[in-house]
Amino acid sequence: MPRRNHHSGRRGMPKKGASKRARSAAVWEPRRLPDDGAAFLGTQVETGPSWDYGAPYLVRRMGASAAKKYYICPGCNQDIPPGIRHIVAWPRDSLRGSEDRRHWHTACWERR
């Protein structure tokens, strides 16, 4: 059985005899992800706090091992120290994107 070129079956990849120009043109570029963090695995849409009239918010749960800094919770105005699991939430339709992210205690987010 003849040996197949493993690149010949992939879309966008040049065949073995392709010119150098064709090979360089087939370089795959990853698509750019949103800067606001919406593409992270586990990001969900939930109803926001009452003072924002229930606007949709993007919400991520941060585990204790991922919490590396101190944050101020907007729900109780208290510290969230490093090593405490918490919620990161920001308005879905915000024009400022990641600048609007806020870190909440889990309990404060639940009673928002």
Image (cartoon, helix red, strand yellow):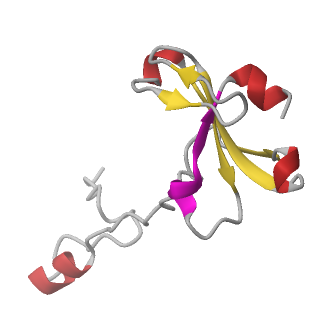
Residue 28 screen position, x and y as percent: 32, 68
Residue 66 screen position, x and y as percent: 45, 24
Asked if residue 16 is among those painted magenta in the image, a careful observer would answer: no
Quadrant of the drawing holding the C terminus: top right
| Residue 112 or residue 11, whichever sits in front | 112
Query: Residue 72 is drawn in which quadrant?
Result: top right
Query: Residue 2 is drawn in which quadrant?
Result: bottom left
Q: Identify which residue is drawn at 81% across, 54% down.
A: 56
Residue lying farthest left? 20
Residue lying farthest front? 77
Q: Identify which residue is drawn at 54% across, 15% down.
A: 84
Asked if residue 98 is among those painted magenta in the image, a careful observer would answer: yes
Query: Residue 6 is drawn in which quadrant?
Result: bottom left
Q: Is residue 29 above or below residue 66?
A: below
Q: Is residue 23 above or below residue 81?
A: below
Drawn side of residue 1 relative to residue 77, left or right:
left
Drawn side of residue 27 relative to residue 90, left or right:
left
Drawn side of residue 22 relative to residue 104, left or right:
left
Q: Identify which residue is drawn at 71% across, 65% down.
A: 93
Q: Is residue 37 above or below residue 64?
A: below
Task: Give the magenta-colored segment's residue range.
Answer: 97-104
Residue 103 screen position, x and y as percent: 59, 35
Drawn side of residue 20 relative to residue 45, left or right:
left
| Residue 24 or residue 30, whichever sits in front | 30
Q: Is residue 104 above or below residue 19?
A: above
Q: Identify which residue is drawn at 55% across, 22% down.
A: 80
